[in-house]
Image (cartoon, grey):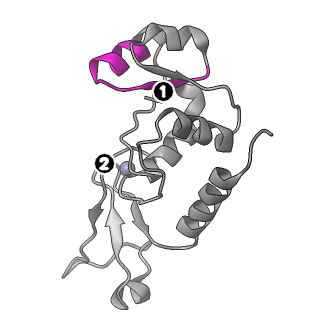
Amino acid sequence: MADEMLGRLARYLRFFGHDVRYARGLDDLEIARQADSEGRILVTRERDLARRSRDSLLLRSAEIGGQLREVRRAHPEASYVPVFDRCAECNTLLTRWVPPDRSPWPDDVPADRVRAGLEVFECPGCSRRFWEGSHAARIRSQVSDWFSEVVGP
Ligand SMILES: [Zn+2]
């Protein structure tokens, strides 16, 4: 469970396939209550909020690379490889998009590349469609930079 200040972190953790709820528009009590009742780890930069939950991770870093390293240090057993099997916007697991037989294809789908074998995935939660492209390549390279950064002496 990522608190409202950690939207970017929530998206990156979802890229790694983690089931991350983003607590938007909830008060502290409600965030902690939901995290506890769903057995989630509450990730926050606010000490008072961290204290309210049974299982929390208090982050110090204000920037995304540092936050990801802190999460990995606390939970080294989890995977930190981008797999893109979950919608970064709404957390729903993606399914393979199947081109319709009769109706026209949606405008956003790169038809030529799909006919050439490109796989397209769809979010059953928010209907966004995704495929492997420059965005994914950028995220992979960014993540690998952040994790290879040497911090401290
Ligand atoms: Zn979605």
Q: Compared to 140, does 99 lie above or below?
A: below
Q: Is mark 2 within 8 Å of ligand 1?
A: yes
Q: Secondary structure at mark 2?
A: loop
Name the residue: 35% across, 26% down: 40
Residue range of the region highlighted in magenta in the rendering: 31-45
**Mark 2 → mark 1, Cα distance in angstroms:** 17 Å
Depth check: 152 or 111 in front?
152
Looking at the rendered image, the quarter that the C terminus falls into is: top right
Front residue of this view, candidates 107 and 87: 87
Q: Are marks 2 and 1 in contact (CB under 8 Å)?
A: no
Task: Determine the residue positioned at 67% across, 25% down.
Answer: 60
Q: Is residue 19 left or right of residue 103?
A: right
Say which amino acid is labelled 2: Gly
Decide which of 51, 136 is in the foreground and name it: 51
Residue 143 picture location, percent across and down: 60, 55
Q: Nearer the viewer, residue 144 or 8?
A: 144
Res. 22 image quadrant? top left
Residue 121: where, in percent of width, then height? 34, 66
113 lies above or below 77: below
Using the image, tell me which numbered label, if any, was put on residue 36: none
Q: Secondary structure at mark 1?
A: loop
Task: State the residue position of label 2.
Answer: 125
In the image, what residue type sits under mark 1?
Arg
